[in-house]
Image (cartoon, coloured by chain):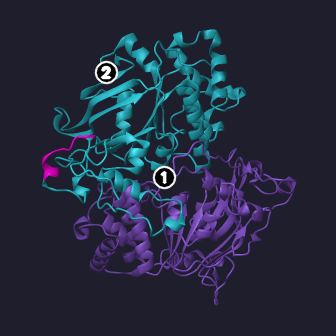
Chain colours: A purple, B cyan
Amino acid sequence: MSQPTPASATPPGGHLLDLRDLHVEFRTQEGVAKVINGVSYHLDPGETLAVLGESGSGKSVTAQAIMGILDSPPAHITAGQIRYRGRDLLSLSEEQRRQVRGREIAMIFQDALSALNPVFPVGWQIGETLRQRLGMSRADARRRVVELMDLVQIPAASKRLGDYPHQFSGGMRQRVMIAMALAMEPKVLIADEPTTALDVTVQAQIMDLLADLRRDLDMAMILITHDLGVVADVADRIAVMYAGRIVEHADVRSLYRAPAHPYTKGLLDSIPRLDQRGGKLATIRGLPPNLMRIPSGCPFHPRCPYAQQVCVDVVPHDLVLGDGRTSACHFAQEVRDDRTR
Amino acid sequence: MTAPASPTKVRGETILSVDHLVKHFPITQGVLFRKKIGAVKAVDGVSFELRRGETLGIVGESGCGKSTLARLLMRLEHPTAGRATLAGRDLFAASGSELRRIRRNMQMVMQDPYTSLNPRMTVGDIIGEPFEIHPEAAPKGSRQRRVQELLDVVGLNPEHINRYPHQFSGGQRQRIGIARALALRPEVIVCDEPVSALDVSIQAQVINLLEELQDEFGLSYIFIAHDLSVVRHISDRVAVMYLGRIVEIGTEDEIYQRATHPYTQALLSAAPVPDPDARGRRSVIRLHGDVPSPADPPSGCHFRTRCWKAQEICAIQAPQAVPRAADPHPSACHFAEVRT
């Protein structure tokens, strides 16, 4: 586990991956949905950043923008930069993007069954990139596929090359997908809800595997999730998203100890705890906003117990708190110091 | 809205009793003469009791049979063997008007609020549909008023009676599903993963609603879920299932503090805890491999292939869920002990 880096520090030479003020909108027949509204985050070699949010918060769309796999239309990137090793990926040609995709930045998805092709054997699917992109011979690719399947701890790998996705259990399928993502030895792995579809005991196996691989291969990882438990287990830093914005950004320990945004605080208070039997759960009132009609000022204000008139009128900027954290709340310090939990 | 009508309503007495329930789905071969070549043992001898006003949580991983159990209790499947009684009436022998009376008394809330509501029916029609089947529950003239009462009870605006499901969010749809389940004033509600499709901030609202309704109407819940924290929060007693069997059953405290079955212990230890300071300090039991196929479960104890305590006896003799020396709650393990 690397040292948590303060959210503001920039290493010499810049960050490995650096998102700057990204804006994405979906133009549909019903109107324009502003899905990403100025997201900035960065990733350094070897670290794990968790991007936490509920459905519609924009966490997956951000990842798809990094990968360059947004469907356009309806998605349009209207502003911002995605800098990888100093180069803005958004200014590259599609052919140059292809060189980055898979080789530098790879992604695994939540639902391994629908992400894999049902009519090809898994060995063939893992080897496809090796043959197509690296020009490996079939025999070399096959050897490498067995290595990769061993790496992700699929038992009896050489016997299972010819098996089809439906012959694997959910956890094993997720391992196949991880093997595919690792084929080109990427520097950044984006894991989009990698364990959400899995059972608790299998989830623990996959999160262990990802943590080991990240360390052994010295990858950086972006973990996209809605699960506050998983984040606490593996992440160094955490960015909390709401309505297409990052509302709080901090190292994991500080954030769980004293959340500085009312939304984060609400989330932490509303989850039932395994180690406590509680009475009534705290809730966040209301619903997440419709992205076609995001509330004025702070998008969280209609649901926020701290909201004042200023929250309706003025969009809060990232407030840098003393310990290198940021919170997009007018009352960030009050929220952080409020211990009524 | 008045509480469900019932001749005897003593809190704590047994309302639902399930005895050695078995459901095997045949595996067949051939087209014309379908030969039975095996069976998926989805539910393999499950017994428990549900008391009035109580919540019994049922936890287990996919394939453990918890949803088949729910379908059996709702009589959507017919059991291979075993019996169950609801308020003294035999659940599986009943037919005709007797069955309709039983069904009125036990309703279900489904997991997926997106597919369990008919998109072409208004909310009023969805919640009122039970009255079409059970006209004696509400006279025709009073139905709209009843539906609006139900909307109000679950925290939705009664004026939205003519809206369609797509006009509601996931959490609101789950409230519609709960209102539908309440329509016939049942005493027992089977909740099959009622909050797992919902976002965290919405999940808490629905859990609180279920608890309020329980207090208000004296409902008994069977609460099926895979999320151990949610089950602990809402349940009075908890049953842990593995490959069609209940491996351990006890009060919330017995299961979460003094579990004696290795599978329960592994399940509890694998659940992530939202506390970064616990990282590395929790002693996590890592289970290897996957759950075996219910078509071909291991002999003896079903868990023995993944169990670190397994001995010869575990392959020969299936342990019964009986009180153990380590702790007096039933645990189906030959080597039951509290984890230290």
Residue A253 as seen in the image, left or right of residue A146? right
The residue at the point 67 percent across, 30 percent down is B163
Circle 1 marks a residue in which chain?
Answer: A
The quarter in which the C terminus of chain B is drawn is bottom left
Disc sitting over residue A221 in the figure: none
Question: Around disc 1, counting alpha carbons within 10 Å, would you say few (fewer than 14), some (14 to 19), or many (20 or more)?
Answer: many
The quarter in which the N terminus of chain B is drawn is top right
Where is B109 relative to A172, above or below? above
What is the three-letter code of the residue carrying label 2? Phe
Where is B7 relative to B43, above or below? above
| Front in this rendered view, residue B118 or B76 | B76
Would you say residue A71 is visible in this rendering? Answer: no
| Front in this rendered view, residue B257 or B156 | B257
Q: Position of residue A132 (x, y in %)?
A: 40, 76
- The Cα–Cα distance between marks 1 and 2, rounded to whole angstroms, is 36 Å
The residue identified by callout 1 is A274
The residue at the point 51 percent across, 50 percent down is A276
Circle 2 marks a residue in which chain?
Answer: B
Residue range corresponding to the magenta coloring: B313-322
Query: Which element carries disc 2, helix, strand or loop?
Result: loop
The residue identified by callout 2 is B92
| Front in this rendered view, residue A340 or A53 | A340
What is the three-letter code of the residue carrying label 1? Leu
The residue at the point 60 percent across, 10 percent down is B140
